[in-house]
Structure formats: C-alpha cells, structure tokens
Amino acid sequence: MQGLLAWFDANARPLPWRTQTVSPWESLLAEIILQQTRIETGIPYWERIRTAYPTPAALAADTEENLLLLWQGCGYYARARNLYKLAQELDGKPLPKTYDALLKLPGIGPYTAAAVASISHNQPVACVDGNIRRVISRFRAKHMTDSQIQADASALLNTNRPGDWNQALMDLGSQICTPRNPKCNQCPIENNCMASKSEDATEWPMRRSTKQKQIQAAALVIGGDQGIRLEAREGRTLGGLWGVPYAEGKAAVRQLLSGREVKEIGRLRHDFSHKKLHVTVYSANAAATDELRQPESVPLSTLDRKILELFKVHQSEES
C-alpha cells in the first residue's frame, strides 16, 4: 500500500479533532459518536459534549440524564449510557493508553480501543471499521471473515505512523473506495489493488443483509399545553430516555388504549436498524392522577419528538 500515507497527508478530511490538538478523552468522544452517526451530524454533538464534559471526571460528577439531554437526536443511546458508566468506572483517573486496558472499559470494543490507542498514543494496533473492511477486501479481491480482515489489517499496518495509517484507510474507504461507484482512477493504491483489475470492484466485500422487522405500534399522547404524561423508557435501545406511553403488538396496544377515551390523530413511520415501526398516534385528555411534564425538561428519543410534533400539528389544526 505504498503511497497511502502521502495521499492522506494531502487529502485528509479536515475534521475538528484532526485540525486542533485534542485530548485522548476528546478523541474517544469522537470515536463513540461516529460509531453509528454520520460525521456531519456527529460534529455538533462532539462539540457540545466535550464542552460540557472536558474530562471523564466532569461527566462522572453529573447525571446520566443530563448527558442524555445533550445526546438527544444522536441515536443509539446505549452509547451514551456506556459512556457515563465508563466515566464513573474511571473514578477521576485518566483514560488508559493501551489497547488492552481500553478494551476493558464499558462500551469500548476492539475498533474504538484500537483507534484511540493508535491515534492518541501511537500504539501499533490496527483498527477495522466498515470502510477499512471494504478497502482490504477489495485490495485482496477476497470475501474475508472478520478475523481474516483484522489479521490482514495488522499485517499491513505502518507501525511508524499507526494512527495516521488507520485514519488513512478510513478516509480512503469513505472518499475513494466507496460502496458504490468507487473512484479507482483516483486511488493511491490502485496499482496493487486486485479488485481494480476486475470487471466490478464492488463485488467485494460480501454484502451483509440486515432484515428489518415490520412492527405495528401505538403511542398515546396524554395532556396538552399544561404538560404531557411522560414515562421513563426501558430496554437497550431507548433505556434512560423518556417518552409517551407506547406499545407494540395487538394485545399490548389494546391494553395501552383501554380505560381512556382516545382519538386517533395520525400515523408515522420510524426506522431502527433492526425494525421498522408503523406507529398509530392517539391522544387523550389527562386524568387527575396523571403526572404531567414539559417535554423540554427530560431527554426524549427522536421517535418521541416525532410523535409530539405530530400532536402539535394536530392541536394547531383543531384550534
């Protein structure tokens, strides 16, 4: 892969954690946010979270709910909950420097541990994300297992500049060796790339199919201008957030709507990576026993913000 670092030096994306000196903690925040969030979406979250919590100790001294308020809209909230656990586990100590020690912390997997260790501490460890997996698979023109990709990434690693090397492969995958229509004629490693000599470079890597379940669900907005009934969410996907009463499946929906005079106000769709929700939204007047809150006072998921936006539109049309 001769020429890769020279290409990176000339073409590296000017990301804010590259164009300024940042701490290992700030580098970790960037890696965690970008695990499942696009860069253009993630940068504002990185800025606000690192400003609010410049050290792990600053986060540990605050509440998980306040972190989730800052995280609203970024999705995959388990990342935020694990980040809070990580800060508490450090108990005022700085982030460890080595791959093995980082890997023991909550929410840090092999990719994140390798990225932080190599970029922040020049540790000679290769990281593999989706971009790197695609570049290496095409470079070899082979369908490879995760362990084979990791072994190849380690063998190819430039140990003098491991952090830059890892980032160079990521940038190559995101800018040149894209999933569709790769720009092979602009690639610095084209001469040694086996896929570029084939009829169709996009044959590699083997596509991983993810089938979404179709879920029928219902949401019930109780209250109005005086406040909304909101409940603490549970579960891996939205745990730690708040939302309106919600149910999936016919039996659960019947139970959700029983005992109140409800009105259907609209429908919406919402995608998670593993399921596609078809949500019917209902409204009902608040009872004396309902505890009402202002939605701005608690962290809400994107799904619940969409539900409440639909409710606001309905209210404006009714008035």
Image (cartoon, rainbow, N blue to C red):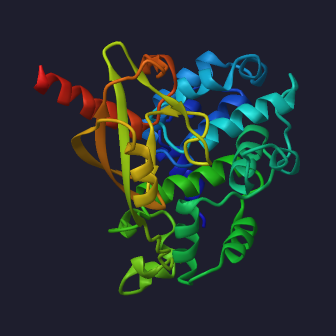
Indicate left or right for 225 with 137 as reference: left
Taking the spot 41% from the left edge, 63% from the top edge, the residue there is: 178
x 37%, y 44%: residue: 257
Which residue extends farthest top?
Answer: 226
Query: Is residue 281 positioned above or below 127 on the image?
Result: above
Residue 266 locus on image (x, y percent): 21, 43
Quarter containing the C terminus: top left
The N terminus lies in quadrant: bottom right
Q: In screen coordinates, is 62 left or right of 305? A: right
Q: Quadrant of residue 159?
A: bottom right
Q: Position of residue 175 (x, y in %)?
A: 42, 55
Left or right, 162 with reference to 214: right
Residue 56 falls in image quadrant: top right
Instruction: Say which of 21 and 242 sits in front.
Output: 242
Q: Is residue 178 visible?
A: yes
Task: Please tell me which residue lies in front, 210 or 24.
Answer: 210
Does residue 130 lie above or below 49 as drawn? below
Q: Residue furthest front?
A: 259
- Asked if residue 275 is positioned above or below residue 120 in the image, the reply reads below
Residue 227's place in the image compared with 173, above or below, is: above
* Between 132 and 283, the one nearer to me in the picture: 283
Q: Is residue 265 left or right of residue 100?
A: left
What is the number of callouts on the image? 0
In the displayed orientation, state which residue is furthest to the bottom: 199
Q: Give the residue drawn at x 28%, y 30%.
A: 309
Residue 122: % across, % down? 78, 44
Residue, x 41% and y 67% (percent of image)? 179
Is residue 249 in sight in this rendering? no
Residue 144 rendering spot, x and y as whole percentages: 62, 80
